[in-house]
Image: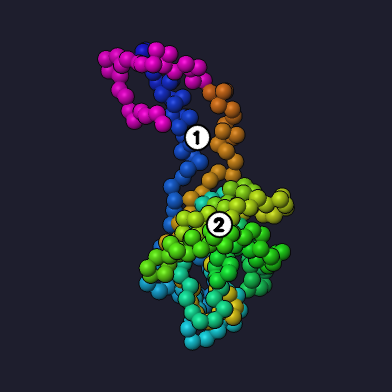
Amino acid sequence: MKRRTFWKTMMGVWLLMGLTAETCTAATSIFDGRSFAGWEGNTNSVWRIVNGAITAGSFDRVEPRNEFLATVRQYTNFQLRVRFKIQGTEALNAGVQFRTQRIPNHHEVSGYQADIGTGVDGHLYDESRSNRMLASPSKSAVERALRSTSAEGWHEYRISAINQRILIWLNGVQMIEFNEPDPAIPRSGIIALQIHGGMKGTIAYKDIEIEEFPSEPAAARIGPVAELSAPKSVFPSRRFTLETGDVLIGFSFF
């Protein structure tokens, strides 16, 4: 194979592989376990960091109202992972907000919530908007997920929000799939952690990671793959040869 043809071929292969790579970015931690950098909320009297976890609540008193610790920046299409542990004696309830907005001059937020608490684990709730459950898991799915609780009482939510499609997993078990029918509902917003008013106990969140995806497929932004200038038949004889001085770098097929 001539050197020029070889490198044209390689460029075409790498470009096609790049389209896949762009839609599968590495997960990024959005909580460093030590500070509230990148977050905002009442960190004076509600939210604190205990043993590397964002924590709120008390075993000695009832939480007077809903409170939220929110990210400073907004996110659109993503997959979010967060571990949480809730414990206490009264009205245990919390949640992970996403595609959410702060309500101006108010302690509340408005948006989707992956609910937390007995009877609502795995549910998708519409906080301060329609104020109703948008999707609910089967009882058997929740029971299966709760059997996978860690020995220390930690659970994990995995939340996928891609365009209008929302999926939630609890401890690796899929809870719900919801397709938002209303195009007016925002598809971007903050992520926020909730402690619910009336609760007597604590809620803790840690290991918070997010994997972001493009707002639209990469192929749509650069044009159809058919427009690429790569040869129609990359290796017609199912093999290629290297000439003296040619170098093969990081080549693989999947």
Q: Amino acid at mark 1?
A: Leu
Labelled pair 1, 2 in contact (Cβ < 8 Å)? no
- Residue 168 appears in which quarter of the rendering? bottom right
Expressed as whole percent of the image width and height from the top left, the position of residue 31 reads 44, 62
Q: Is residue 156 above or below residue 238?
A: below
Expressed as whole percent of the image width and height from the top left, the position of residue 74 reads 57, 56
Q: Amino acid at mark 2?
A: Met
Please count the marks in the image: 2
Kindly identify the residue that appears in the image at 38 percent across and 70 percent down.
152
Q: Is residue 204 above or below residue 27?
A: below
Kindly identify the residue that appears in the image at 64 percent across and 58 percent down.
135
Does 147 sit left or right of 239 as displayed? right
Which residue is tagged 1? 19
Asked which secondary structure carries label 1, the reply is helix
Q: Main secondary structure of the magenta part?
A: loop
- Residue 209 appears in which quarter of the rendering? bottom left
* Residue 246 within the segment the image draws in magenta: yes
Characterize the local packing of mark 1: few (<14), some (14-19) or many (20 or more) Cα atoms within 10 angstroms. Answer: some
User: Which quadrant: the C terminus?
Assistant: top left
Give the magenta range. 229-254
Q: Residue lying farthest left?
A: 244
Which residue is tagged 2? 175
Q: Nearer the viewer, residue 3 or 148?
A: 148
Q: Nearer the viewer, residue 115 or 210?
A: 115
Kindly identify the residue that appears in the image at 48 percent across and 50 percent down.
211
Q: Is residue 71 visible?
A: no
Q: Is residue 193 above or below residue 64?
A: above
* Residue 39 within the segment the image draws in magenta: no
Expressed as whole percent of the image width and height from the top left, the position of residue 87 reads 47, 76
